[in-house]
Image (cartoon, rainbow, N blue to C red):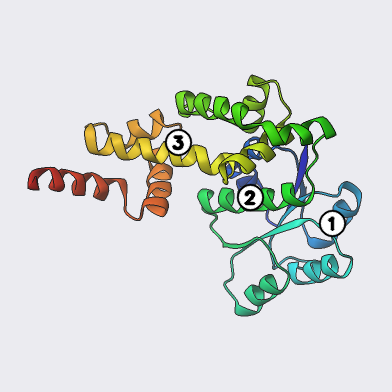
């Protein structure tokens, strides 16, 4: 459905981004790679990716030159910058170029996927690949979304992605993504993640399950990733949250 292009001169970085991105959840079915901006520009002309994730410092042609070329030629792809430098000139250029996000290396998985979610939300607003019958159906899709939400509530701890849900309800990924955003005001990734975090709060406060067990139960790859995501979204680590809950119960 959608294409993403990763531009970085370091193969390991490209591999990491490819591994950390929850591509299927966002309907991204093709991931392209380039080792520098010139190579990336050739791919952009040929493949027209909707999403570009690029480094800034690269040989041959760097990210600065790439952003200027994309702006000059009015390329509509959404851009996420991933860089090892927090240099002000880069961040200023990113703001001027209206990039979706500027993420510092090493890449945090949640930061990356939040940025991809934001980019895809913008893409779907500008380039909604929805058929005329589905466009008309968007006006009466409330019951369908209620069914989808009910299914997510029962199965959110499993691997729920946009393609999986679309197949389950026999509708296109494009239609489901747009309808979900219209009816709920949020994207699918954010909604499922919030459900996982709510369940995590319950498990931390009401059970003695280890953090690793909670992470496994909720579908996170490991306890460290779970802790990082939890702290970023809740404002404190899972361990601190559990301690605070215990202290609150003692004080009652």
In this rendered view, identify the residue nearer to me: 129 or 196. 129
Query: Which quadrant of the figure contains the N terminus?
Result: top right
Q: Secondary structure at mark 3?
A: loop
From where the camera sits, is residue 8 visible?
Answer: no
In this rendered view, identify the residue nearer to me: 40 or 129. 129
Pointer 2 with pointer 3, Cβ within 8 A? no
Where residue 158 sits in the image (x, y, percent)? Answer: 49, 26
> Horizontally, is 185 left or right of 58 in the view?
left
Sequence-first disc among 2 and 3: 2
Q: Secondary structure at mark 1?
A: helix
Give the spatial CA distance, label 2 vs label 3. 18 Å
In this rendered view, identify the residue nearer to me: 67 or 10. 67
Q: Residue at x 26, y 31 (%)?
A: 209
From where the camera sits, is residue 229 visible?
Answer: yes
Give the spatial CA distance, label 1 vs label 2. 22 Å
Query: Which quadrant of the figure contains the C terminus?
Result: top left
Q: Residue at x 62, y 36 (%)?
A: 25
Where residue 4 sits in the image (x, y, percent)? Answer: 74, 47
Badge 2 density bin: few <14, some 14–19, many ≥20, Cα 10 Å? many
Where residue 149 sits in the image (x, y, percent)? Answer: 53, 30
Tag 2 residue: 116
Tag 3 residue: 220
Q: Can you name the residue that lies furthest to the left here? A: 251
| Image depth: mark 2 or mark 3 in front | 2
Give the spatial CA distance, label 3 vs label 1. 35 Å
200 above or below 80? above
Q: Residue at x 73, y 46 (%)?
A: 124
Sequence-first disc among 1 and 2: 1
> Horizontally, is 146 left or right of 216 in the view?
right
């Amino acid at each position: 459905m959608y294409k993403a292009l990763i531009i970085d001169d370091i193969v390991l970085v490209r591999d990491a981004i490819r591994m950390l991105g929850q591509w299927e959840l966002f309907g991204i079915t093709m991931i392209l790679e380039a080792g520098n901006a010139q190579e990336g520009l050739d791919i952009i002309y040929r493949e027209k990716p909707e999403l570009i994730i690029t480094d800034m410092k690269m040989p041959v042609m760097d990210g600065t030159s790439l952003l200027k070329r994309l702006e000059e030629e009015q390329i509509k792809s959404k851009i996420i910058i991933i860089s090892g430098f927090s240099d002000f000139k880069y961040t200023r250029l990113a703001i001027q170029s209206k990039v979706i996000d500027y993420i510092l290396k090493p890449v945090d998985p949640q930061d990356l996927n939040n940025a991809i979610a934001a980019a895809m939300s913008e893409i779907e607003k500008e380039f909604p690949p929805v058929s005329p019958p589905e466009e008309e159906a968007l006006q009466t899709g409330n019951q369908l979304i209620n069914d989808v939400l009910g299914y997510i509530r029962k199965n959110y701890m499993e691997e729920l992605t946009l393609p999986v849900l679309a197949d389950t309800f026999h509708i296109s990924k494009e239609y489901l993504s747009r309808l979900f955003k219209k009816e709920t005001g949020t994207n699918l990734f954010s909604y499922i993640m919030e459900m996982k975090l709510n369940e995590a709060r319950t498990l931390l406060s009401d059970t003695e399950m280890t953090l690793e067990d909670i992470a496994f139960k909720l579908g996170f790859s490991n306890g460290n990733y779970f802790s990082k995501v939890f702290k970023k979204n809740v404002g404190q680590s899972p361990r601190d949250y559990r301690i605070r809950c215990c202290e609150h119960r003692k004080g009652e």
